[in-house]
Image (tube, helix red, strand yellow):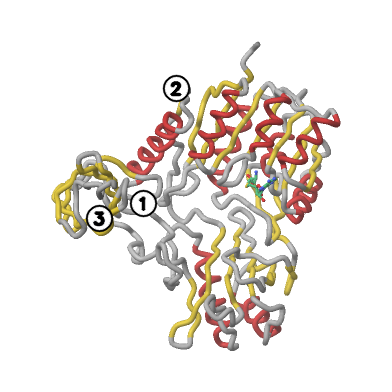
Amino acid sequence: MMGKVQLPVQKNQIIDVIFEDLTHDGNGVAKVDGYPLFIANGLPGEKAKVKVTKLNKGYGFAKIMEIYEQSRYRVTPECPIYEECGGCQLQHLSYEGQLKAKEKQVRDVMQRIGKIEDVMIHPVLGMENPWRYRNKSQVPIGEREGGLIGGFYRQRTHDIIDMKECLIQVEENDHVLKEVKEICGKFGVKPYDEKSHKGLLRHVMARYGKISGETMIVLITRTAELPNRKKIVAELVEAIPNLKSIVQNVNSKRTNVIFGNETKVLWGRETITDYIGDIQFAISARSFYQVNPEQTKVLYDQALQYAELTGEESVIDAYCGIGTISLFLAQKAKKVYGVEIVPEAIDDANRNAELNGMDNVEFTVGEAEVIIPNWYKEGIEADVLVVDPPRKGCDQALLDTIIQMKPKKMVYVSCNPATLARDLRILEDGGYKTLEVQPVDMFPMTNHVECVAKLELRSV
Ligand code: SAH
């Protein structure tokens, strides 16, 4: 029989360590005889006394007792609830340090997962002012001493940390959340309770057009009935400047998924508008819209540059959302085909094409991995193919089709470097070469990093 594996540390042991690295989720990593310990709040280069809290076969966890030597990139977090809230992970790291860490993260996965050696990875494009950038706030609602509370969950729990202000959020959204809590609380709206599956108000979403100044509120409820609806609406309209839309979404399921399938306008319009560059967008409650419009412009400009359009090209934009990238590309392409799974987003995309007087775009609802193979069979081909998938990356069926279709150029926009690296490996094996990767910091203070990669078909 195999004996118990002897680990170099024991539970509750107190040891001195030097942090070597930062994980993609913002934890420090220190190694004891090669055995990695993940330790919250540690930064590379720091020396600390830690206590071992949990041991697994291949790795363990510890917590910091004392930091002997601080990183020169360590700063005091600006936010008063940073330690409790799970929303940001990197406020203890200076912004310069964050950009360096994100670049390293991208380099690491390109090597480790993508096995891509000779690719140009540029330094991360950061923000001049990395605060108050988010245009969308979406928080679960709970209750304390009779009043409604709302805010992010404490890390790895479902305890709500009441949030009065969020420093990465536009101030307008702080105000919306405050008013919704007060007004809904006053009219006896009960928060949804996950355990008993009772109560009403599950989440509140506020979306603000940074250029247009328009605001939308979405109340996500368990049942369609909203007591005192008229009074609540009237008071919200009174309290929130430039409010253009109040929407209710009903989600009656026991689920972590935020939105349900039923959406109705309680007051005002179905959409708010905003601009990225010169292009205007109508955005409805259910549609994905980039949360950092300033950096989105930076990202899309890069994507457009990588696409090297001359006006003659046929372009496919997979995972197109409300057509943001599609319309950017359509300014310079002959024809753009967009595909997206959420029907409301495609309604928005069509509206947006019209709004901007663009008639060289065509949008289709469906799964990219189903629609694009069909297009290929029908003879629709692309000179340039752009993908911007969700965190899980591209579906294998889509990658297979791309490899058969052989568009000369590809632009891969990604919010998850690990799945980007995985998919680039598949595309490299299928005949593509990754030329450049440009990381863009769309989410300062958090552990997320967005990338845009340029690929070319190798000549045969
Ligand atoms: N390019 C857009 C949206 C990117 S987010 C923008 O920059 O704004 C990813 C989008 O992919 C979301 O809108 C999501 O609804 C959509 N999506 C998710 N799975 C999909 C699939 N299998 N096929 C097509 N679209 C999908």
Question: What residue is pinned by disc 1?
Answer: 90
Label 2 CB-ligand 1 distance < 8 A: no
Q: Is mark 1 in CB contact (under 8 Å) with mark 3?
A: no
Q: Residue furthest top?
A: 460
Secondary structure beneath disc 3? strand
Is 222 placed left or right of 12 in the picture?
A: right
Looking at the picture, how far across and down is residue 118, in whole percent?
A: 46, 20
Identify which residue is drawn at 36% across, 45% down. 23
Instruction: Please name the residue that numbered disc 2 is placed on.
Output: 117
Q: Viewer-proximal residue, 127 or 201?
A: 201
Q: Are marks 1 and 2 in contact (CB under 8 Å)?
A: no
Sequence-first tag of 2 and 3: 3
- SS class of the residue under badge 1? loop
Mark 2: amino acid: Glu
| Earlier-in-chain disc, 1 versus 2 | 1
Q: Amino acid at mark 3?
A: Ala
Which one is in front in this view, the residue at disc 1 or the one at disc 2? 2
Label 2 secondary element: loop
Q: Left or right? Give the position of 325 relative to 110.
A: right
Picture quadrant where residue 242 is located: bottom right
The kind of residue tagged 1 is Leu
Give residue 306's position: percent from left, percent from top. 60, 27
Residue drawn at x 60%, y 88% as measured from the top left: 187
Residue that carries the numbered disc 3 in the rendered image: 62
Given residues 182 and 433, the one toward you in this image is 433
Please tell me whether mark 2 or mark 3 is closer to you in this view. Answer: 3
Residue 178 badge: none
